[in-house]
């Protein structure tokens, strides 16, 4: 039997942080937290790095530096899936933005 489930549950959103006024520090981290732009840059940089790694692996396979085609296929598939996921997330964000812009206040 599983004991102590949910005894140390932390809230997903810090309501106290959401209620604090902005001190004109848009680009600075609050208590070590990243802002949205930094997180977005980090994620897109990761997707870009996967694409570059797949390109490099394909080039190395063509020159004969990598003989194991499985490594190349894994890197290529990883890059393809991450790019597809990024595209789907962008589409969902745009759909949400359009839905919010259609709301009447």
Image (cartoon, grey):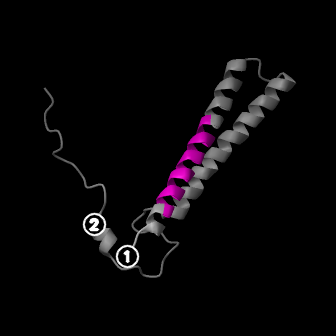
Q: On screen, 58 above or below 36?
A: above
Q: Which of 13 and 84 is in front in this view?
A: 84
Q: Quadrant of residue 47?
A: top right
Query: Which of marks 1 and 2 precedes in the sequence?
Result: 2
Q: How crowded is mark 1: few (under 14 residues within 10 Å), some or many (20 or more)?
A: few
Q: What stretch is highlighted in magenta?
A: 81-98
| Magenta region includes residue 59 | no
Q: How crowded is mark 2: few (under 14 residues within 10 Å), some or many (20 or more)?
A: few
Report the side of 50 relative to 95 (left or right): right
Q: Quadrant of residue 33?
A: bottom left
The residue that label 1 is drawn on is 105
Q: Which of 41 and 28 is in front in this view?
A: 41
Dominant SS type (magenta):
helix
Residue at disc 1, secondary structure: loop
The numbered mark at residue 15 is 2
Q: On screen, 26 above or below 38?
A: below
x%, y% of residue 59?
82, 31
x%, y% of residue 88?
55, 46
Residue at disc 2, secondary structure: helix
Q: On screen, 90 above or below 103?
A: above
x%, y% of residue 99?
46, 62
Measured Cα–Cα span from mark 2 to mark 1: 24 Å
| Residue at horizontal 77 percent and vertical 35 percent from the top | 56
Exactly how many numbered labels are in the figure?
Answer: 2
| Residue at horizontal 56 percent and vertical 52 percent from the top | 90
The numbered mark at residue 14 is none
Report the side of 3 relative to 81 (left or right): left
x%, y% of residue 105?
37, 76
Report the side of 91 relative to 74 (left or right): left
| Residue at horizontal 71 percent and vertical 25 percent from the top | 72
């Amino acid at each position: 039997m599983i004991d102590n489930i949910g005894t140390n549950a932390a809230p997903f959103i810090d309501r106290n942080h959401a209620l604090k006024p902005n001190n004109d520090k848009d680009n600075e981290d609050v208590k070590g937290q990243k802002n949205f732009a930094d997180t977005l840059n980090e994620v897109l940089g990761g997707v870009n790095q996967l694409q570059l790694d797949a390109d490099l692996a394909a080039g190395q396979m063509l020159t004969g530096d990598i003989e194991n085609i499985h490594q190349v296929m894994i890197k290529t598939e990883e890059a393809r899936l991450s790019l597809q996921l990024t595209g789907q997330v962008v589409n969902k964000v745009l759909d949400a933005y359009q839905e919010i812009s259609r709301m009447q206040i």
